[in-house]
Amino acid sequence: MSMAWLWKDMPDFQPVREACALMGGMTKLAKKLGVPVPVVSGWASGTRPVPIIRCVEIEEVTGGEITRKQLRPDDWWQIWPELRGGD
């Protein structure tokens, strides 16, 4: 089932949307992370930032296809300074 209707007329945060697609939908990603679907919806719409611990979990469940850097573009270097090496 397409989740596109959830994002209609909403600003979006592409990395979370891509994570949802990789996991087979928003509901499946929410279940995998142990959070309610509306929480993931808030991240996907850009209305809520992805919490630090969830960034690590999303990176893990997507096999690294969605990274912590992508999920926290404004502050990743402050949270995970060890990731600076490649930039």
Image (cartoon, rainbow, N blue to C red):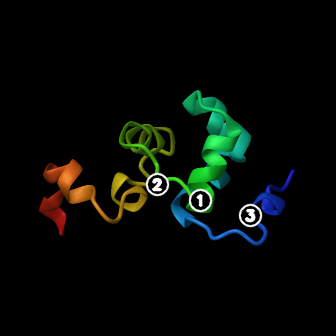
Q: Which type of secondary structure does the marked residue at label 2 adopt?
A: loop
| Number of other residues with Cα within 10 Å of mark 3, as a class: few under 14, some 14 to 19, many 20 or more | few
Q: Amino acid at mark 3?
A: Trp
| Number of other residues with Cα within 10 Å of mark 1, as a class: few under 14, some 14 to 19, many 20 or more | some
Image side of residue 19 versus residue 55, left or right: right
Residue displayed at 64% across by 36% down: 30
How many numbered badges does the structure rendering display?
A: 3
Q: Position of residue 40 (x, y in %)?
A: 62, 45
Q: CB atoms at circles 1 and 2 under 8 Å apart?
A: yes
Residue displayed at 87% across by 50% down: 1
Q: Which type of secondary structure does the marked residue at label 3 adopt?
A: helix
Q: Quadrant of residue 10?
A: bottom right
Q: Which residue is mark 2?
A: 65
Q: Position of residue 54 (x, y in %)?
A: 44, 39
The first of marks 1 and 2 along the sequence is 1
Residue 1 is labelled as none
For marks 1 and 2, give the one nearer the viewer: 1
Q: Which residue is mark 1?
A: 18
Q: Which residue is mark 3?
A: 7
Q: Nearer the viewer, residue 38 or 55?
A: 38
> In the picture shown, does residue 17 fall above or below 59?
below
Q: Nearer the viewer, residue 5 or 32?
A: 5
- Residue 19 in view: no
Image side of residue 51 versus residue 69, left or right: right
